[in-house]
Image (spheres, helix red, strand yellow):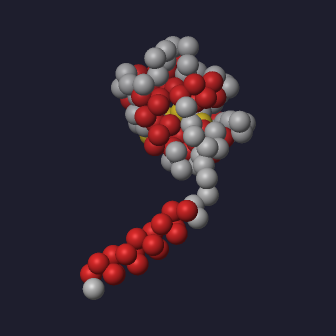
Amino acid sequence: MLFKYMKQINRKMDKNISQKPSTKTINSEDVYNMLLTIPKGKVSTYGDLAKALGNPAASRYIGRILGKNPNPIKVPCHRVVMSSGKIGGYAFGTQKKKQLLQNEGLIFSDEYRVNEFSKVRFYPKKG
């Protein structure tokens, strides 16, 4: 009885999995190239990058890629923030990320939230 029940559940799960829309695989090179399009004084979100790269569900994966950025001076991963406008993590610490953004002219409404976020938000072009 239990075996039969589990078999039915597995069939339903397989059906649901096969109906999921396909999503584009994201590689780090594509992410780093997209970062180069974010102008100084602007920020994008992890989700903005994921959507532009064809996989809207990959915002956390984008964050992991940015955490491994081999050249943060050349590839400005500090310009990527959370969808709430908070600056999020940074390999060299949140204070350093905030300082880099302030050097580019961004202002903060509280300790770690970008002021007037909607005005400085940059939406990368879809790839």
Q: Residue at x 45, y 69 (%)?
A: 13
Residue 45, percent from left and from top:
56, 40
- Tell me the quarter of the picture where residue 24 sits: top right
Question: Looking at the image, which is closer to me, 83 or 115?
Answer: 83
Rendered-image quadrant of the N terminus: bottom left
Q: Residue at x 46, y 36 (%)?
A: 63
Count of all numbered marks drawn on residues in the image: 0
Q: Is residue 5 above or below residue 88?
A: below
Q: Is residue 103 left or right of residue 95?
A: right
Q: Is residue 25 left or right of residue 123?
A: left
Residue 52, percent from left and from top:
66, 41
Residue 104, percent from left and from top:
58, 21
Q: Is residue 76 left or right of residue 121?
A: left
Rendered-image quadrant of the C terminus: top right
Residue lying furthest bottom:
1
Q: Residue at x 37, y 21 (%)?
A: 92
Please indicate, yes or no, whether residue 98 appears anywhere in the rendered image. Answer: no
Q: Residue at x 61, y 53 (%)?
A: 22
Q: Is residue 77 above or below residue 71?
A: below
